[in-house]
């Protein structure tokens, strides 16, 4: 059973909205339905990139939940979960082949992100008095690890039984400007409790900064079901980090109360989008980090819950990380053909990225992202599925 926080009517989710100067057609529902529960063909992911073999790995649990992951970028390609009628629905917006992932105008679909998830201002930070310069690939800022972040590398893969995949990668000293040889391991585990559990582990031989996450694009109504604005969202955060016009945090932790960012009670995304404001304008919608409330005794934050308005699928996000980036698909521009030939239309997917805060290396008041030799970066995030 789902907790009572989702005991509200869905009529609130039917409020429509626009944002910025996007036309109404951008918000229209895609007139298709989830036709089947098939995942892309393995053969479409068997290729060679940078001299390394790519493939597609299939994880299953006893209840039939299925995940498809490629070692190109450590990407989540498909995730089949049961809806309220028991039908399996693919809730991941992505592509059908490794080549279409590689050639996409949006490089982050489903990917493992590193070395640093989110933005670093001006592509610069200082450690022990030494300034490091990174690639600026997001206007004047550094985003998601640079021009060739972890989303563009081929990871070494080892499948452990039916439900676990281990991915590993060594990021060399000064790769994309980051100091230290960073040894990274990411483990995907499809549990018996219908959870996708992601464990991140990293060590370094030189002081560096690390902030790993996953950039899955979700639509709980199905990958081809249209707008996500009628999803019902709750984020367990009393504060968020407002940003400037380039999406760099100002350094303040502002209360969500009486703002568009207040998702402390289950609310249709469209309802809060309609409230507008300068911060919504800066992000062209929601593209902001939430400061999660205190974790439980187990160290896990109950970060968020979100419900698909058509399928009854509920996703709960739990994490050891202090922050959660909510991205509402504001920069999707129908430039790519996804699974089934569906275009990546404006706001037809959302992301809930567990993380440390953006620009932490330049914000002394934010939780530190520094990793030292002899220390181990370890963090776990869980995406738990059920129905209402």
Image (cartoon, rainbow, N blue to C red):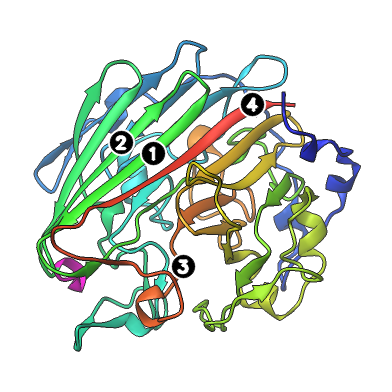
Q: Secondary structure at mark 2?
A: strand
Quarter of the picture containing the N terminus is top right
Q: Which residues are magenta?
A: 175-179
Residue bearing mark 2: 187
Q: Which residue is mark 1?
A: 198
Dot placed on the residue nearer the N-terminal end, 3 or 4 = 3
Residue 244 position within the rendered picture, expressed as x and y whole percent measured from the top left: 56, 83
Q: Is tag 1's residue or tag 3's residue first in the polypeptide sequence?
A: 1
Task: State the CA–CA distance, disc 3 to disc 4.
Answer: 28 Å
Q: Return the disc, 2 or 4, that comes first in the chain's sequence.
A: 2
- Marks 2 and 1: CB-CB under 8 Å? yes
Considering every residue shown, the one lying at the far front of the view is 297
As for residue 178 lying within the magenta part, the answer is yes
Q: Earlier in the sequence, mark 1 or mark 4?
A: 1
Magenta stretch, main secondary structure, is helix
| Residue of label 3 | 357
> Tag on residue 92?
none
Label 3 Cα crowd, 10 Å radius (few <14 / some 14-19 / many 20+):
many
**Residue 39, visible in the rendered structure:** no
**Seen in the image, is 312 located left or right of residue 77?**
right
């Amino acid at each position: 059973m789902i907790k009572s926080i989702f005991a509200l009517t869905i009529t609130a989710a039917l409020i429509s909205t626009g944002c910025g100067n996007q036309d109404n057609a951008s918000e229209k529902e895609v007139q298709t339905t989830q036709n089947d529960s098939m995942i892309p063909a393995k053969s479409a992911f068997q290729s060679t990139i940078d001299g390394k073999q790519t493939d597609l790995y299939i994880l299953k649990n006893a209840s039939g939940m299925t995940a498809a992951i490629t070692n190109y970028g450590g990407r989540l390609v498909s995730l089949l979960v049961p809806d309220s009628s028991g039908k399996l629905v693919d809730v991941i917006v992505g592509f059908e082949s490794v080549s279409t992932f590689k050639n996409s105008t949006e490089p982050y679909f489903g990917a493992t992100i590193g070395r640093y998830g989110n933005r670093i201002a001006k592509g610069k930070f200082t450690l022990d008095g030494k300034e490091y310069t990174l690639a600026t690939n997001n206007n004047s800022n550094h985003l998601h690890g640079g021009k060739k972040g972890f989303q563009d590398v081929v990871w070494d893969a080892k499948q452990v039984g039916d439900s676990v995949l281990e991915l590993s990668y060594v990021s060399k000293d000064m790769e994309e400007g980051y100091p230290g040889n960073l040894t990274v391991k990411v483990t995907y585990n499809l549990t018996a409790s219908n959870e996708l559990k992601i464990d991140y582990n990293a060590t370094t031989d030189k002081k560096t900064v690390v902030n790993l996450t996953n950039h899955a694009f979700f639509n709980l109504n199905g990958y081809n079901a249209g707008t996500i604005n009628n999803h019902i969202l709750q984020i367990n955060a009393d504060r968020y980090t407002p940003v400037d016009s380039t999406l760099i945090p100002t350094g303040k932790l502002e209360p969500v109360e009486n703002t568009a960012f207040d998702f402390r009670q289950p609310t249709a995304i469209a309802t809060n989008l309609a409230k507008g404001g300068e911060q919504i304008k800066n992000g062209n919608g929601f593209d902001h980090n939430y400061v999660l409330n205190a974790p439980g005794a187990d160290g896990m934050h109950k970060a968020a819950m979100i419900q698909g308005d058509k399928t009854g699928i509920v996703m709960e996000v739990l994490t050891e990380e202090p922050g959660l980036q909510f991205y509402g698909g504001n920069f999707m521009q129908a430039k790519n053909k996804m699974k089934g030939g569906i275009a990546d239309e404006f706001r037809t997917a959302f992301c809930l990225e567990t993380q440390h805060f953006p620009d932490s290396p330049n914000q002394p008041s934010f939780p530190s992202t520094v990793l030292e030799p002899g220390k181990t970066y370890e963090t776990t995030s869980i995406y738990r599925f059920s129905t209402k």
